[in-house]
Image: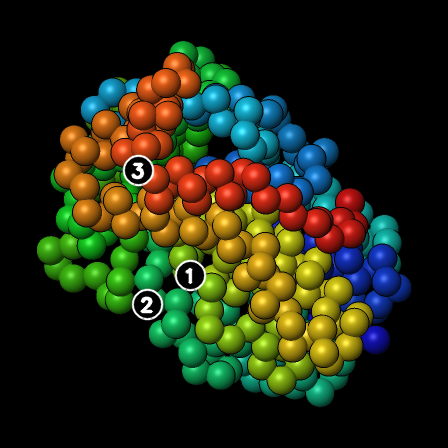
Amino acid sequence: MKIAVIGAGPAGLFAALAARRYNISVDVFEKRQVGGGIVCGECIFDSLRIFPRPDEGLLRPVREIILQGRRGYKLALGKYRPLWMVDRKTWQRGLARRARDMGASLHENTAVSPARLNAMQAEYDWVIDAGGAPCVTSRLHSFQAEYFREYLLAYQFVLEGDFSALMPRLKFAFLENIPTRFQPSYYWVFPKYAHTANVGVVCTVHGSLGRHDPNLKELLADVCRRENLQGFTIVEKGGGIAASRMVTRLVYGNILLAGDAAGLTSPLHGGGIDLACLSGVVAVEALWGGPREVARYGKKLKAFLRERKAVEDIAIRKMRSFSFDQFDRLLAGVTARGTPARLKTGLCHPDLLWATLRWFGTKKKPPAWPV
């Protein structure tokens, strides 16, 4: 078997590693250099508690996060699900080096056009498109609009300054004066080091933005003023979109979609690295298993996501229907230190309590991770 992988991000690199484990010939095509063009908080949230601990590029485990409503609430997230702060560039370059050592061919600075993808379908047995959203397959098969039904729009600075007061924690702050249709919306301050942090803002968008819709560059400038970051040095800046719902169809002939191309970003918190890696491995397992397994590829991914998705959907409905004060009270209850206070909050929100218990109580069988 010979396959092509489009994109050397987490999904594409894990797909390449999984392919080589099966001794499948694999060519990886990356439009930039590996580790380039990253616009995110650079955290890996193991939302299913099945992801292998990252090695190269790991900066530290994150035990506690700050959720900011009216006040800042501490959540010991590490007690429930692993969260790691990583240097994505170092991590991805380490994965790429491992894939090369295992025999994968990596072609950097090589963009794949729709015409080239069309030719690839004849040259390769299978193609895994892990090239982000909107992906090249969407241009070839004209489904770009799927990514813009509901998506996360983000803008970020990498800042240099003194972040030692927040270290080693991370901060999510929810935005109050944003219309309901753009919820979830929030900003993040994720220190990588004591003097470097990723600071960004994100909102949920349906369709195209209009003149009176949120301007993320202005919102981020407001965030910097609110957090007293105006004098800090901007090292990098950039933005992008991520589809927040799995696309309807994941297989187009001999093309499988993975990672952001499959729409696997969390609609609640914007994370998706763990699911991207998972989809790359599950895609290769499907190819190795034959046509019947390829037909089941989407169902397998949905089975992994079922319980987590239920929690996120409920939380998003509450964010869109609650006033900011109501949502702040929910944050206070969820993060309360005492069990009675958390139980009281759960009884006031039984739908969220039940879904959360199912999410945390359901054990998923992990794939055979190639790392």
Q: Which residue is at a point 40% across and 47% down the rendered structure image?
A: 312
The tag earlier along the polypeptide, 3 or 1, is 1
Task: Give, as a three-letter code, the residue at label 1.
Answer: Arg
- Name the residue that disc number 3 marks: 349
Q: Which residue is at a point 18% across and 41% down the rendered structure image?
A: 322
Q: Are marks 2 and 1 in contact (CB under 8 Å)?
A: yes
- Name the residue that disc number 1 marks: 245
Q: In which quarter of the image is the C terminus?
A: top right
Q: Which residue is at a point 79% across and 72% down the rendered structure image?
A: 289
Toward the top, the furthest residue is 165
Q: Do the residues labelled 3 and 1 touch (CB within 8 Å)?
A: no
Which of the pair 46/333 is nearer the observer? Answer: 333
Q: Which of marks 3 and 1 is in front?
A: 3
Which of the pair 130/107 is nearer the observer? Answer: 130
Say what secondary structure mark 1 lies in: loop
Q: Describe residue 124's horizontal placement relative to residue 266 as left or right.
A: right
Quadrant of res 13: bottom right
Which of the pair 333/153 is nearer the observer? Answer: 333
Q: Are marks 3 and 2 in contact (CB under 8 Å)?
A: no
Q: Nearer the viewer, mark 3 or mark 2?
A: 3
Q: How far, Cα to Cα, is label 3 from label 2?
A: 29 Å
Toward the left, the furthest residue is 212
Q: Is residue 137 something that shows in the picture?
A: yes
Q: How is the image coloured?
A: rainbow
